[in-house]
Amino acid sequence: MTLARRRLLNPECQDNMIWSKKLSGASGAKALESITHSIVNDSDSFEMNVKSAQIGFYEVRSITTTPINYIDTPVADHEPNIRFVFVVSGSIAIRQGTTLHRVFSGEMIILFEREMYSTLILEPTHMVMVSFPEIAASQRGVVSGGHLRHVAAASVLSLAARAFFLGLLRPSAFPLPPVEQLRATRAIDSVLLGLLATAENPSASKNDRNAEERAVITSFIASNFSSPALSTASVASQYGMSTRSIQRLFAECGQSVSESIQQRRLEHAVAILLDERFDELSVEDVAKRSGFTGADHLRRVMHHEMGCAPSQARANR
């Protein structure tokens, strides 16, 4: 079962919320270390304001901070994250391994937490950070070599993404009902997959390039899954590929095209079933809105993937 699906079905995982914190001095640095597993240097002059929203497996943060130097260390039993960092104002420097990147106002960098990295905030800075487990990216068809990636200030997509994430941080919108949470998650999927596909990656390997192709195709699937006609063959045709070629491309991440389509449809159907605002919809209506051929098709898939019927999912929410 995918991470997104577990979060939809498990009440303990339906944790979309928003909070704000002000951290300052040594006590604030210690609090930050406990939250992010970062080691903060020069904590006496440290001051940071954080607004954070949890949307499914995505964490979106708006951070304003004084100059600071901290080291992010991997946690042994913790799934590594991918982080998209947008610099709204100010500048930062990030070192991972032998690679050092300066990121200025209007620019963006993509970080993979498989390795330890250090961040130097060079001046008072405002940044937006989006984090999510790498396994979630894998289940969306994206598997990367883990290299730092940089997006220049001139990127319209980067600027639009930054505005989109700042717009998400509205307390009045939370908590999100299941369908709205899924819609927000899909919108974030689309934005981040697009950024991964277009970001500069000078050291890109064949695996990286394949991941970028999958990101584009996965975004297409996310936008068209509700059409019953969507299939491996129709997706391959959309991109001028043979069915065998697209199957090989997706086999690298352990999920076939048809499984990716079914995953999107099932997540959509379950979100509707869990949302009391849609109780007037029959199982047949839910199935057809989600791209299944009918209620029997949805029941078979839910029984196979989740061990329960649509009516049970509604009754147990």
Image: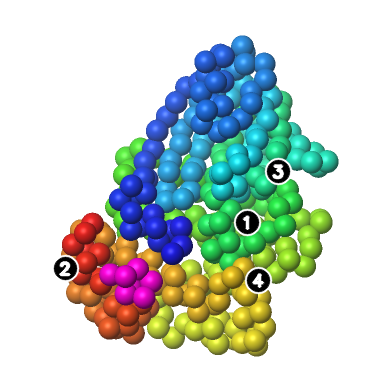
Alpha carbon distance from label 4 to label 1 = 21 Å
Alpha carbon distance from label 1 to label 2 = 38 Å
Q: Identify which amino acid the numbered label 4 is placed on.
A: Glu
**Does label 2 or label 3 sit earlier along the sequence?**
3
Residue to which mark 1 is pinned: 195
Find residue 108 and report its image quarter: top right
Above-or-below relation of 43 to 101: above
Crowd tier of the residue under label 3, counting other residues whose Cα lies within 10 Å: few below 14, some 14–19, many 20 or above: few
The residue shown at (71%, 28%) is 120
Residue to which mark 3 is pinned: 115
Residue to which mark 4 is pinned: 252
Image quarter of the N terminus: bottom left
Alpha carbon distance from label 2 to label 3 = 49 Å
The percent position of residue 22, horizontal first and vertical second, equals 47, 22
The magenta span reads 302-308
**Does label 1 or label 3 sit earlier along the sequence?**
3
Give the farthest residue toward the top: 44
**Does label 3 or label 4 sit earlier along the sequence?**
3
Above-or-below relation of 137 to 26: below
The percent position of residue 88, horizontal first and vertical second, equals 60, 36
Assign a secondary structure to mark 4.
Answer: loop
Alpha carbon distance from label 2 to label 4 = 41 Å
Q: Is residue 219 left or right of residue 275?
A: right
**Does label 4 or label 1 sit earlier along the sequence?**
1
Q: Is residue 242 left or right of residue 20?
A: right
The residue shown at (59%, 35%) is 127
Question: Can residue 269 be seen?
Answer: no
The percent position of residue 196, horizontal first and vertical second, equals 64, 57
Residue to which mark 2 is pinned: 280
Q: Identify which amino acid the numbered label 1 is placed on.
A: Leu
